[in-house]
Image (tube, rainbow, N blue to C red):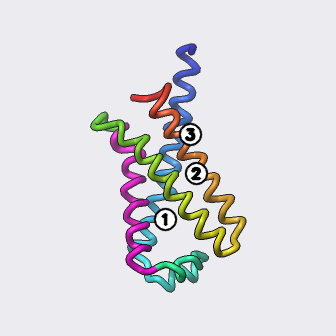
Amino acid sequence: MPEGRLADVNVVLWIVQAGLALAFVFSGLSKLTQPRQALIDRGMAYIGDLPQPLVKVIGTLEVLGAIGLVVPAWTGIAPVLTPIAAVGFMALMVGAMFIHLRRGEPKVIVANGLLFLLAAFIAWGRFGPYSY
């Protein structure tokens, strides 16, 4: 692959990594810091269907995964953790799609599907041709 194109795809991967990390760090921190009812009132009605400890676990996974998308690659310390974090988000989004399918929320399933595809793009790129 030409050097310029390799650099372009790498830049796109970094942008997607940073964007996904920001989305998940904010989502995770809200689950970890906001009261249950506040989350439900802010449009996360599915929170009412989940046990509170599970909500905290999901929030923790989101924050740790967000860190994993950026920090290992950025520092060069265990950069294989970046695509592993992306695979973790893929699994998390599959679980989210099942929850929203059960609740009859097709618009949210589409959003989860988009997040799944972005994570899959990162996993493909960082495990494959654009690894560190």
In the image, the segment drawn in magenta is: 51-73
54 falls in the magenta region: yes
Compared to residue 48, the image places residue 125 above or below, namely: above
Q: Residue at x 65, y 75 (%)?
A: 103
Q: Residue at x 55, y 81 (%)?
A: 40
Q: Alpha carbon of mark 3 to alpha carbon of mark 1: how far?
A: 20 Å
Q: Which residue is mark 3?
A: 121
Compared to residue 51, the image places residue 58 above or below, namely: above
Q: Which tag, 2 or 1, sits closer to the chain's start? A: 1
Q: Alpha carbon of mark 2 to alpha carbon of mark 3: how far?
A: 9 Å
Mark drawn on residue 114:
none
Looking at the image, residue 46 sits to the left or right of residue 107; the answer is left
34 or 100, nearer to the observer? 100
76 falls in the magenta region: no
Mark drawn on residue 116:
2
User: Closer to the observer: label 3 or label 1?
Assistant: 3
Q: Secondary structure at mark 2?
A: helix
